[in-house]
Image (cartoon, rainbow, N blue to C red):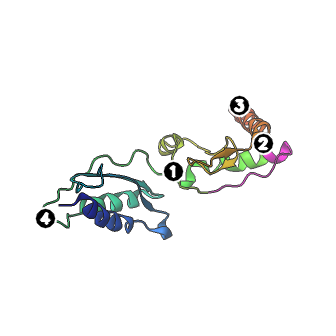
């Protein structure tokens, strides 16, 4: 039994579980298979990154993953792990985002725009707990989590000013 062939077939199946229209991505990211050229690999380990916008999609993907069956009767399929964050509902910042836009305008800072990026952060937990949550107010840059990741240092003072202004506005709001 060649674990590389079985893993390749499973990866192709798993990659089909994504649904772009619903914002669901299912991305095989890491494969550890075999160790030397002249030995048929007996084991494979695959890591999958799954991101969902809606909780129902989480259940659908979990069901699909749990329904996988081996292609080779000599193979064994074992799954570990699961979702490590709840999805961040767009409603998590309904009243807070306009405040951030207003603060940026008042301070003469570049316009603030809401963007759905499909990432995961601790903000997912606060949003799921019903706490108004804005994510992505930190450093401006690109290439997140890649070898070519970069930060625009020149924009850091503006971002700090925006956050300070937003905190001050929230503090003033709570005092009234």
Q: Are marks 1 and 4 in contact (CB under 8 Å)?
A: no
- The kind of secondary structure element at disc 1 is loop
Name which of mark 3 and mark 2 comes first in the sequence: 2
Q: Are marks 3 and 4 in contact (CB under 8 Å)?
A: no
Query: Which residue carries the number 2 mark?
Result: 155
Judged by its main secondary structure, the magenta piece is loop
Viewer-nearest of discs 4 and 2: 4
Task: State the CA–CA distance, disc 3 to disc 1.
Answer: 24 Å
Residue drawn at (38%, 69%) of the image: 16
* Region of the chain picked out in magenta, as a range: 103-115
Q: In this view, does 131 lie above or below 67?
A: above
Name which of mark 2 and mark 1 comes first in the sequence: 1
- The kind of secondary structure element at disc 4 is loop
The reply to whether the magenta stretch includes residue 96 is no
Report the label total: 4
Q: Position of residue 78 (x, y in %)?
A: 22, 52
Task: State the CA–CA distance, disc 3 to disc 2.
Answer: 25 Å
The residue furthest top is 175
Q: Label 4: few (<14), some or many (≥20) within 10 Å? A: few
- The kind of secondary structure element at disc 2 is helix
In the image: residue 120, left or right of residue 45: right
Query: Which residue carries the number 3 mark?
Result: 171
Residue 57's disc is none
Q: Position of residue 46 (x, y in %)?
A: 33, 53
Task: State the CA–CA distance, disc 3 to disc 4.
Answer: 63 Å
Residue drawn at (25%, 63%) of the image: 6
Viewer-nearest of discs 3 and 1: 1
Query: Which residue carries the number 1 mark?
Result: 88
Name the quadrant containing residue 104: top right
Q: In this view, does 161 lie above or below 102?
A: above
Query: Which residue carries the number 4 mark?
Result: 73
């Amino acid at each position: 039994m060649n674990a590389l062939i079985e893993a390749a077939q499973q990866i192709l199946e798993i990659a089909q579980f994504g649904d772009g229209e619903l914002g669901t991505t299912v991305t095989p990211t890491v494969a550890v298979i075999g160790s030397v050229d002249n030995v048929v690999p007996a084991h494979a380990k695959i890591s999958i990154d799954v991101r969902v916008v809606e909780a129902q999609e989480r259940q659908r993907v979990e069901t699909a993953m749990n329904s996988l069956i081996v292609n080779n009767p000599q193979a064994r399929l074992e799954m570990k792990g699961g979702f490590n964050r709840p999805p961040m509902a767009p409603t998590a910042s309904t009243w807070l985002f306009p405040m951030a836009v207003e603060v940026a305008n008042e301070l003469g800072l570049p316009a603030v725009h809401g963007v759905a990026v499909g990432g995961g952060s601790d903000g997912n937990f606060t949003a799921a707990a019903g706490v108004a949550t804005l994510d992505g107010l930190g450093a401006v840059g690109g290439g997140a989590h890649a070898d070519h990741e970069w930060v625009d240092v020149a924009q850091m003072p503006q971002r700090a000013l925006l956050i300070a202004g937003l905190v001050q506005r929230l503090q003033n709001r709570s005092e009234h």
